Amino acid sequence: MEHSGNEVKVRWSKISPNKNTVSPAPVDTQSSSSTKEVAASVQSKYKTLLVTTEDNITKITLNRPDKKNAINLVMYREITQALEEAAKDNSTLTVITGCGDYYCSGNDLNNFGENLEEILKNDGKWLKDFVKHFIDFPKPLIAVVNGPAIGISVTLLGLFDLVYATDRAVFQTLFSQLGQTPEGCSTYTFPKIMGPAKANEMLLFNKKLTADEARTQGLVTEVFADSTFQGEVWTKLKAYANFPKNSLALSKQLIRSVEKETLHAVNSRECDQLVERCFSDECMNAITSFFRKKSKL
């Protein structure tokens, strides 16, 4: 089904907030790690990311701590570009993490009407392409979840090879609350990882998981105390990065090849459905209700 960009703008501009994301709490942007990475990002070619390569590891840091690392259209494009470059560089591992107290608070709902126009171009082709980069990524891809994770930052975790989390991380999707449907291949990966019943609690009924619950259900590989999280995780990763690079990449590709075709088909169906949902009255009413409740907090 085709929809005009003007129709999107008119209908959604009425409910777009001035400043809101799907994340539930403010973030401390004064931490030393936040300040250090934000300062370093000034010299980066990216506006929303900090990308470094060291010790055979390419590290992609979501770098909007003042927005709880919410993903806007610029960040979507930059993550895609960073993954393309990491796939071709000489690193052994690629890591995605967040700057500040949040890993990622999901989609940035600022100026949502304008963003939606871009999202819906060519039946959601840009979103399909974004997820495709995770499906096809040729090297070990590791999530270092340094704080709360919401929405698409959670659903994509099923496409990572390892997920390490601090014990203060929480994981939640809000699709039903917002009148939307899941993405990131989670309708396939979540039931496979944690079983249909537990997957349904998250994807249908917005259940929030603690880090330990996510580990028990198989979404997270290992949980670390927050006080030692960075030190322990990076010690592990630096050791892994010394493994033979080609062996790791080829083994990862063999594992992924078994279900790659299925993942691409799931991604396409999920994106098609999400585009349709964005035009439904139910979705628009749910978003309006969500912002109304947030404004009263």
Image: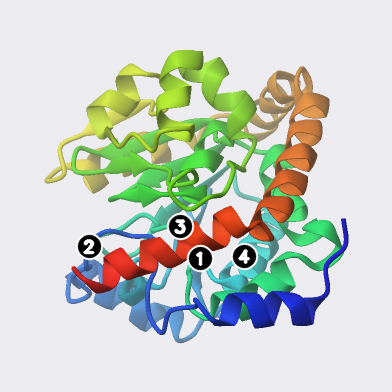
Find out whether the residues at labels 1 and 2 contact each other: C-beta distance under 8 Å: no
Residue that mark 1 sits on: 71
Q: Residues within 10 Å of mark 4 (few under 14, many from 20)?
A: some
Residue that mark 4 sits on: 76
Q: CA distance from mark 1 to mark 2?
A: 16 Å
Find out whether the residues at labels 1 and 3 contact each other: C-beta distance under 8 Å: yes
Residue that mark 2 sits on: 25
Label 1, secondary structure: give it. Answer: loop
Q: Work out whether mark 2 precedes mark 4 in sequence or the reverse, and give the earlier one.
A: 2
Q: Nearer the viewer, mark 3 or mark 4?
A: 3
* Mark count: 4
Residue that mark 3 sits on: 106
Q: CA distance from mark 3 to mark 2?
A: 13 Å
Q: Tag on residue 62?
A: none
Q: Residues within 10 Å of mark 2 (few under 14, many from 20)?
A: few
Q: Position of residue 222 (x, y in %)?
A: 32, 27
Q: CA distance from mark 2 to mark 4?
A: 22 Å
Q: Position of residue 66 (x, y in %)?
A: 31, 76
